[in-house]
Amino acid sequence: MEENTQDNIEEITWKVPEFEKHERSKNWYIVAGLISVFLLIFALFTSNFLFAVIIVTAALITIIHDGKDADLVDVIIDDEGIIIGRKLYEYDDLKNFSVLFKPKENLKNLYFEFNNPAKQRLSVPLLDNNPLQIRDFLLKYISEDLERTNMPLSENLSKLLKI
């Protein structure tokens, strides 16, 4: 973490994995394979060839992606915005942020909502960073969403299904 003095932090930096790598058992692959085959048969039976292509493409992407390890990318929060890897998210494009810190649930994430509703929410793991320090820094530039008290449903489902 870079700073001039204790009270005057210019930026906060840390590294996060590019994506969350799930540990999948042999049973997960068997169930996923059976569901994929069933959906593929259904798509062919109903002559929905586009759906069949989507199923095959999703299966291939999952297989290729599973063999890849997550690279570490830099997260930088400064006076211009949030930089993740090589992508800058300016504060003007962000609607709000929220910090979820629930040690008993092993949850320590930072969420950003965009002004553009078509853009997906941005989730950043805080890892060993002090959530209060990050919150205080962000409050200088963007409003906080105090309504968010739980992990989004989409993220819960993603963890549950290991996708």
Image (spheres, rainbow, N blue to C red):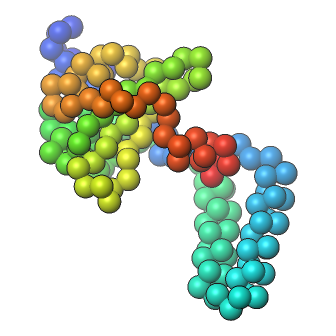
Please tell me which residue is depicted at 38% across the width and 53% down the height of the picture. 120
Toward the top, the furthest residue is: 6
Q: Please name whichever residue, 10 or 101, is drawn nearer the observer in this view of the structure.
A: 101
The quadrant of the picture occupied by the N terminus is top left
Q: Who's the residue at 66% across and 55% down the image?
A: 66
Q: Find residue 51 and report its horizontal and vertical position in percent.
A: 62, 80
- Residue 30: x, y in percent? 84, 59
Horizontal placement of 100 versus 66: left or right?
left
55 w.r.t. 127: above or below: below
Residue 103, above or below 92: above
Percent x, y for residue 34?
82, 66
Which one is in front, 19 or 38? 38
Residue 40 rendering spot, x and y as whole percentages: 74, 78
Q: Is residue 151 visible?
A: yes
Q: Closest to the observer: 20 or 55?
A: 55
Decide if residue 110 is in sight here. Answer: no
Q: Check the image and name the residue furthest to the bottom.
A: 47
Q: Is residue 149 left or right of residue 84?
A: right
Which is more toward the observer, 127 or 71?
127
Side of 80 where 32 appears, left or right: right
Residue at the spot 63% in from the left edge and 52% down from the top edge: 163
